[in-house]
Image (spheres, rainbow, N blue to C red):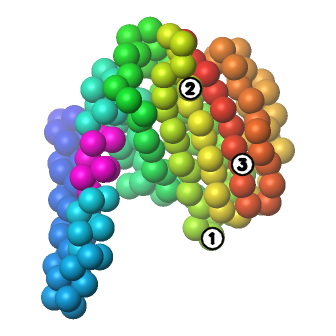
Amino acid sequence: MNEKCNMIEVLQHTRHDWLNRLQLIKGNIELGKIEQAKRIINEIVLDTQHEARLTNLKLPEFASMLLTHNWSGHSFRIEYEIVDDLQVSQLDDKLLANWMHRFFRELDDAVHPLYENHLYITIEPLDNKVLFLFHCNGVIKDSSALEQWLISEHRHAEKVEIRVVSKSEIVVEAIFN
């Protein structure tokens, strides 16, 4: 029964998102802003392509986490891009999803919840490995616990590098194989 409830929730959120997008397009057309409507349509096409690439990774827990993240009460929203069609059969779905869940939890604590915070995730192939580039923009209230966690969690990824830390930006690179 729980799985059916989850499916209904997913359908409700998806329907709500699509209705919002359609209303934006319709509103822009009614206002004569055809170029703006076309831009929104192009964004939808691009988002759908990234969703397709994500689900084609055959990492169901990881994909589900990214696809549903913005529907829950996090202190940041995510956008992701998957560069090329990745072959990630070597990645452990459960390990990756657990690592990402803990990373998101630490990031939730690091950013100020009352501000607009965004995490941009780029996923791309790198010599039989997968590179994850995390770029967070927003208001960082305290990154020390996140930095400590990233250092201690290095054992789960081949490489974790903190590239930038400031009051408005965090950039982290992680390589998994």
Q: Earlier in the sequence, mark 2 or mark 1?
A: 1
Q: Residue 53 placed where, x, y %?
A: 31, 33
The CA distance from mark 3 to mark 1 is 18 Å
- Is residue 60 among the parts visible in the rendering? no
The residue to which callout 1 is attached is 114
Direction from residue 94 to residue 85 in the image, left or right: left
- The answer to the question of whether label 3 and label 1 lie on touching residues, with beta carbons closer than 8 A, is no
Type of residue at label 1? Leu
As drawn, the label of residue 170 is 3
Q: Residue 16 is drawn in which quadrant?
A: bottom left
Earlier sequence position, callout 3 versus callout 1: 1
Instruction: Please give the name of the residue rendered at 38% of the width and 55% of the height, measured from the top-left corner.
Output: 71
User: Badge 3: how crowded within 10 Å, few (<14), some, or many (20+)?
Assistant: many
Quarter of the picture holding the N terminus:
top left
Q: Relative to 57, is 167 on the left or the right?
A: right
- Residue 64 visible in this rendered orientation of the protein: yes
Q: Are marks 2 and 1 in contact (CB under 8 Å)?
A: no
Q: Is residue 72 left or right of residue 56?
A: right
Give the camera-side residue of 63 and 12: 63
- Callout 3 amino acid: Ile
Question: Among all residues in the image, which is located at the extreme front?
Answer: 35
Task: Report the front residue among 31 and 155.
Answer: 31
Q: Nearer the viewer, residue 154 or 98?
A: 154
Q: CA distance from mark 3 to mark 2?
A: 16 Å
Q: Residue at x 56, y 31 (%)?
A: 132
Q: Main secondary structure of the magenta part?
A: helix
Q: Tell which of 28 and 116 is nearer to you.
A: 28
Where are the magenta residues, as a range? 44-51
Residue at the image point whose x is 31% and y is 59% from the top: 43
Picture layout, residue 115 above or below residue 151? below
Callout 2 amino acid: Leu
